[in-house]
Amino acid sequence: MRFKAVIFDLDGTLLNTLEDIVDSVNHVLMGYGLEINQADYYKLRIGRGAQNLIRQASDGKIDEDKIDDAVKEFQRIYAKRFNLKTRKYVGIDDLLNWLDKKRIQYAVLSNKPHNLTTKIVKHYFPHRNFSAIIGQQTGIPLKPDPAQVTKIISQFQCKAEEVVFIGDSGVDMETAHNAGTFALGVLWGYREQKELLKYGAIALAHKPKDIEIFIETTI
């Protein structure tokens, strides 16, 4: 097959994490006496890191010198409740089973903090053999910077053009292109088709099974 490996985004791609994130951010906002936001508001803002999320959710009403404290509070709360409402998307386990069967390597790259990314993936996928699980790390730029993708590809020991980068947002599609990988957008996540296409999705999947078909039939 043309593709030797897959890199997955986490939020909105492997897991529906929306409600636990919403509840955690809103808890922080209430602590600052601010109005909370509805889930649809957050759908368009998840994916560029916790600091960006808190800054937007507070609409600039948390002083800049207090943003870091607010982010730490969000991360503390979310680390305790990340598994209350979060669920795997239907068909994801079947897709991972298929990748194992085909001996296609796979990894996770998220803009969540690294420790949280690892904790969440290992909780929901305890028996999966991910080649890498990587989140935000100090001194390394977030997606759409390709640095972490390049690092993962070196572990795969294949070429960038042999890797499918799978995600639900424009950030993911940008990341895929910046790293020279194939950009595949999923339509069951937090963003709409028009955003995925705007930022360069080369193919779209309506359900996880579509990814199997795509990988197996693409020459």
Image: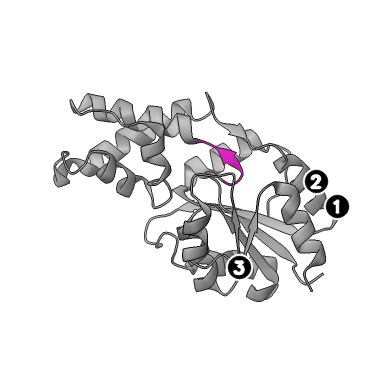
Q: Which numbered disc, 3 or 2, marks the residue closer to the eye?
A: 3
Do tag 3 and tag 2 residues touch (Cβ < 8 Å)?
Answer: no
**Badge number at residue 127:** none
Separation of residues labelled 1 and 2 (CA atoms): 6 Å
Do tag 1 and tag 2 residues touch (Cβ < 8 Å)?
Answer: yes
SS for dot 2: helix
Q: Name the residue under label 3.
A: 202
Residue at 60%, 64% in the rendered image: 152
Any part of residue 77 in sight: no
- Image-quadrant location for residue 75: top left
In percent of width and height, residue 159 lies at: 67, 76
Type of residue at label 2? Answer: Asn
In this rendering, the answer to whether 152 lies above or below 15 is below
Q: Mark 2 points at which residue?
A: 97
Q: Is the C terminus in the top left, top right, bottom left or bottom right quadrant?
A: bottom right
Mark with earlier residue (3, 2): 2
Type of residue at label 3? Answer: Ile
State the extent of the magenta-drawn residues as a range. 13-17
Q: How crowded is mark 2: few (under 14 residues within 10 Å), some or many (20 or more)?
A: few
In percent of width and height, residue 85 lies at: 53, 25
In percent of width and height, residue 1 lies at: 82, 69
Residue at 77%, 55% in the rendered image: 212
Mark with earlier residue (1, 3): 1
Separation of residues labelled 1 and 3 (CA atoms): 25 Å
Type of residue at label 1? Answer: Lys
Q: Mark 1 points at which residue?
A: 101
* Left or right: residue 148 compared with residue 56: right
